[in-house]
Image (spheres, helix red, strand yellow):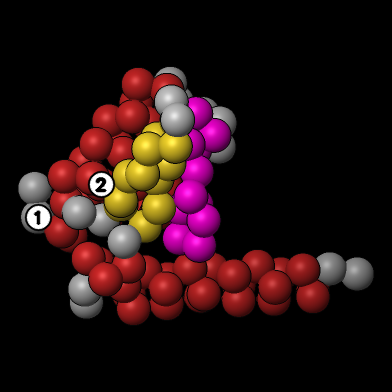
Amino acid sequence: MDALQVVAEPRRRAILQLVWDRELPAGEIASYFDVSFPAVSQHLSVLRSAGFVSVRKDGRARLYKTDRKALGPLRPMLEKLWNERLDRLVSLIEREP
């Protein structure tokens, strides 16, 4: 699977965003989604295979974090996408009476 196919899946992009600035265990990552833990685990596996997330063991927990350098040219694209969404959200909030 090429890099664009990896980040084309919305849940994988959401996972990357969740672990952009912090490490999280798989169970906590899964709690943000309306799919099963095994489904989230598969997405994490794809992201790990692509090198887009790093995994660190802490006792029994495995902590995931985005490897921004590994994203290469995809990094600015993802950051822009997330910033544009945030800007749209702020605009909608500001329009509310």
Instruction: Kindly identify the amino acid type of the residue bearing the numbered disc 2.
Output: Leu
Residue 10 in sight in this render: no
Q: Which callout, 2 or 1, points at the residue further toward the start of the chain?
A: 1
| Residue 19 horizontal side relative to residue 5, left or right | right
- Give the spatial CA distance, label 2 vs label 1: 11 Å
Is residue 58 placed above or below 3 in the rendered structure? above
Q: Position of residue 37 (x, y in %)?
A: 42, 23
Which residue is the site of mark 1? 2
Residue drawn 33% across the image and 44% down it: 55
Query: Would you say residue 96 sits in the magenta stretch?
Result: no
Crowd tier of the residue under label 1, counting other residues whose Cα lies within 10 Å: few below 14, some 14–19, many 20 or above: few
Residue 34 in sight in this render: yes
| Residue found at the far front of this picture | 59
Instruction: Kindly identify the amino acid type of the residue bearing the numbered disc 1.
Output: Asp
Residue 79, numbered label: none
Which residue is the site of mark 2? 47
